[in-house]
Amino acid sequence: MGLTRAARIILVGAPGVGKGTQTERLIRKYPQLSSISSGDLLRDNVRKKSPLGIKAEGIMKAGNLLPDTVMLRLITNELKVRGWMENVMPLTLNSSSIAVEQPEEDISADFETSGLTSDDPSASFILDGFPRTASQASQIDKNIDINWVVSLKTPPSIIIDRICNRWVHAPSGRVYNTTFSPPQVEGKDDVTGEPLSRRADDDPDTWKTRLQKFEETSLSLLEHYDKKGVLWSVNGNSSNEITPQLVKEFERRFS
Ligand code: AMP
């Protein structure tokens, strides 16, 4: 089914709520959609041992957030690489943010965080995990006109149970759950047959820190988008309960 307008979507939810699963399902149903997961981009850097990855690894393991400027450049760069952001301007080298001790030069040295997202339905995307704070949201407002923000709600006690059963295919970000959506062959990715692994941040104590961070930052993030009239919330104890509600509302808005 085709989209009638560009969808620029953010999924907001506690760590482990199933943002990745919902994203994957929407994309499978609507191939015009694509996704950018800030966590996956960072994990990719960690795996490749890039300078950003080396710096991010400790912060992520501790369940803390990376600095806004780093995230902003990482995402803007990705949007441009994919051709979803127009009016690219060259990097202003005397930008004051360069002076801050952060690895900007390692992630997007050729790009400035300027430009506008395309309105063509083919430039439709889901941002997973970014923006995560009201501050990140205000900073992207002028470049990325987010037109749907989905708040995914599942009780934390249910999420922690699920996290203990979560396995991922690191190169693609595909997520499996040994109870709800097991791989066809135990321990192997369905598409490539490569081994699955646990995410380093799927440790219960790390998860609790991440949940606390989420609770601290998400309220003002959701308020930011509520004021813009683009917030929509959905409740469910499992991804399977949430998906049909999400798809119905997506279709009402974009197809
Ligand atoms: P996620 O897979 O979205 O849960 O992200 C994993 C980790 O990456 C987070 O716990 C943060 O350390 C980092 N991270 C991802 N997205 C952001 C963001 N928008 N701002 C700051 N840190 C982020």
Image (cartoon, rainbow, N blue to C red):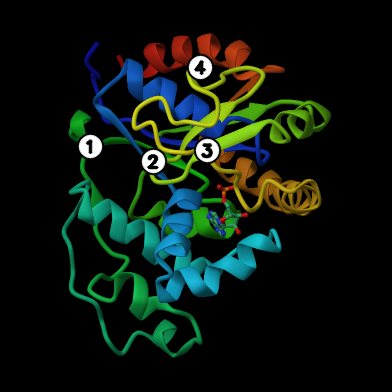
Q: Secondary structure at mark 3?
A: strand
Query: Ligand 1: does it lie within 8 Å of the C-beta at label 2?
Result: no
- Packing grade of label 1 (10 A; few <14, some 14-19, many >=20) is many
Residue corresponding to mark 3: 168
- Residue 54's label in the rendered image is none
Q: Which mark is residue 246?
A: 4
Which one is closest to the eye, mark 4 or mark 2?
2
Three-letter residue code for mark 3: Val
Asked whether, in this view, residue 1 is left or right of residue 162, the answer is left
Give whichever of discs 2 and 1 has the lower sequence position: 1
**Where is mark 1, residue-wise?**
123
Whichever of callouts 4 and 2 sits on the residue coming sooner in the sequence is 2
Instruction: Give neighbour class at mark 2: few <14, some 14-19, many 20+ (Cα, 10 Å).
Output: few
- Looking at the image, residue 30 lies above or below residue 17: above
Secondary element type, mark 1 = helix
Name the residue carrying label 2.
172
Image position, residue 15 (x, y; %): 66, 41
